[in-house]
Image: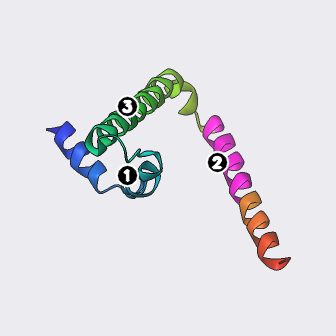
C-alpha cells in the first residue's frame, strides 16, 4: 500500500513533471518508436531515484548515532546557516551590482 501512495505522490512531483516534459523530449529520436524511448528513459529515471534514495537510507542508518548527538547537530546547523547566508550574500551582490 505504501508503494502505491509513493507512486501517486511522485506523479504529482514537479521535478518528475519537468523531467518528462522538458528534458526527455531533447533525447527523443523522431525516427524511432516514441513509446519505447520514453519507457527506457522512465525506467532509467526510476532506477536512478531508487538507487540514490537507497544510498541516503544506508548512509542515514550508518551515521544515525553520530548525527543524533547535540554537539554534532549544532555544528551541522551552524554550517548550514553559514552556507545559506553565503548564498544570500551572493544573490544580493548579483542584484546590487548589475
In the rendered structure, the answer to whether residue 4 lies left or right of residue 11 reads left
Disc 3 and disc 2: Cα gap in Å? 28 Å
Screen quadrant of the N terminus: top left
Residue at 61 percent across and 40 percent down: it is 73
Mark 2 Cα shell of 10 Å, populated few (<14), some (14-19), many (≥20): few
Name the front one of labels 3 and 1: 1
Disc 3 and disc 1: Cα gap in Å? 17 Å
Q: Mark 1 points at which residue?
A: 20
Residue in front for this viewpoint, 7 or 78: 7
The colour scheme of the drawn protein is rainbow
Magenta span dominant secondary structure? helix
Residue at 74 percent across and 53 percent down: it is 82
Q: Mark 2 points at which residue?
A: 77
Residue in front for this viewpoint, 75 or 84: 84
Mark 3 Cα shell of 10 Å, populated few (<14), some (14-19), many (≥20): few
Residue in front for this viewpoint, 35 or 97: 35
In the rendered structure, the answer to whether residue 81 lies left or right of residue 51 reads right
Residue at 72 percent across and 52 percent down: it is 83
Name the front one of labels 3 and 2: 3
Q: Mark 3 points at which residue?
A: 50
Disc 1 and disc 2: Cα gap in Å? 35 Å
| Percent coordinates x, y for residue 62 in the rendering | 50, 21
Query: What segment carries the magenta color?
Result: 71-84
Amino acid at each position: 500500500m505504501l508503494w502505491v501512495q509513493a507512486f501517486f505522490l511522485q506523479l504529482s512531483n514537479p521535478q518528475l513533471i519537468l523531467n518528462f516534459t522538458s528534458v526527455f523530449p531533447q533525447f527523443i529520436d523522431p525516427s524511432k518508436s516514441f513509446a519505447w524511448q520514453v519507457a527506457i528513459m522512465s525506467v532509467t529515471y526510476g532506477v536512478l531515484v531508487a538507487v540514490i534514495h537507497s544510498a541516503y537510507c544506508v548512509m542515514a542508518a550508518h551515521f544515525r548515532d553520530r548525527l543524533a548527538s547535540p554537539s554534532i547537530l549544532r555544528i551541522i546547523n551552524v554550517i548550514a546557516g553559514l552556507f545559506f547566508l553565503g548564498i544570500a550574500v551572493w544573490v544580493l551582490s548579483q542584484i546590487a551590482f548589475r
